[in-house]
Amino acid sequence: MIHKWWHNYIRRKTKPIPGDVAVLWKRRLSYAYGFLAWNAFGLLIYSIYNGKADWAHYYGLKTDEEAKMSPALGWANTLGIKNAKVYRISGLTKVDEYDIVEGEKKTVQEKQINSEELET
């Protein structure tokens, strides 16, 4: 929202534009915006086609290890969460479930095997 004082300042310092000129410039700017948006979309598709979809990995800002890491594990590391439970959902069904323990991915089966080893 524009503050009232800013609105009043602009009104005092500028002269009104005739309505037909305003519509003309609005149309011109909308065509320019459409042209730029279409070209940006084309550049995005071209980049994906050439294998530059993950631009951080392409330009060396992300290591191979980070690129292979799951998004949940990456965000847990970024946010400093050491222990978490992750559910993968596709549509309305649960696809996968695993835990992040001390910053490493542990599946439910691995967790059960580790607990059985500790018991014996």
Image: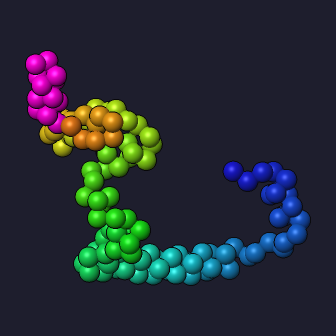
Which residue corresponds to the image point at 60% horizontal and 75% vertical from the top-left?
A: 26
Residue 109 spot, x, y in % from top left: 11, 32
Residue 20 spot, x, y in % from top left: 66, 78
Which residue corresponds to the image point at 52% horizontal and 81% vertical from the top-left?
A: 32
From the viewer's side, name the closer residue of 84 and 20.
84
> Taking 13 as reference, is 68 above or below it?
above
Residue 59 spot, x, y in % from top left: 39, 75
Residue 1 spot, x, y in % from top left: 69, 51
Q: Residue furthest top?
A: 119
From the viewer's side, name the closer residue of 54 and 40.
54
Which residue corresponds to the image point at 14% horizontal and 39% vertical from the top-left?
A: 95
> Taking 63 as reference, is 75 above or below it?
above
Q: Is residue 81 left or right of residue 50?
A: right
From the viewer's side, name the closer residue of 91 and 22.
91
Task: Report if residue 46 lies within the magenta region.
Answer: no
Q: Quadrant of the C terminus?
A: top left
Q: How many marks?
A: 0
Q: Which quadrant of the figure has residue 61?
A: bottom left
Which residue corresponds to the image point at 84% horizontal and 72% vertical from the top-left?
A: 14
Q: Which quadrant of the figure has residue 93?
A: top left
Visual colour scheme? rainbow
> Taking 115 as reference, is 93 above or below it?
below
From the viewer's side, name the closer residue of 76 and 113.
113
Q: Which residues are magenta?
A: 107-120
Which secondary structure class fits the magenta region best?
helix
Answer yes or no: is residue 20 visible. Answer: no
Q: Residue furthest front?
A: 120
Answer yes or no: is residue 63 visible. Answer: yes
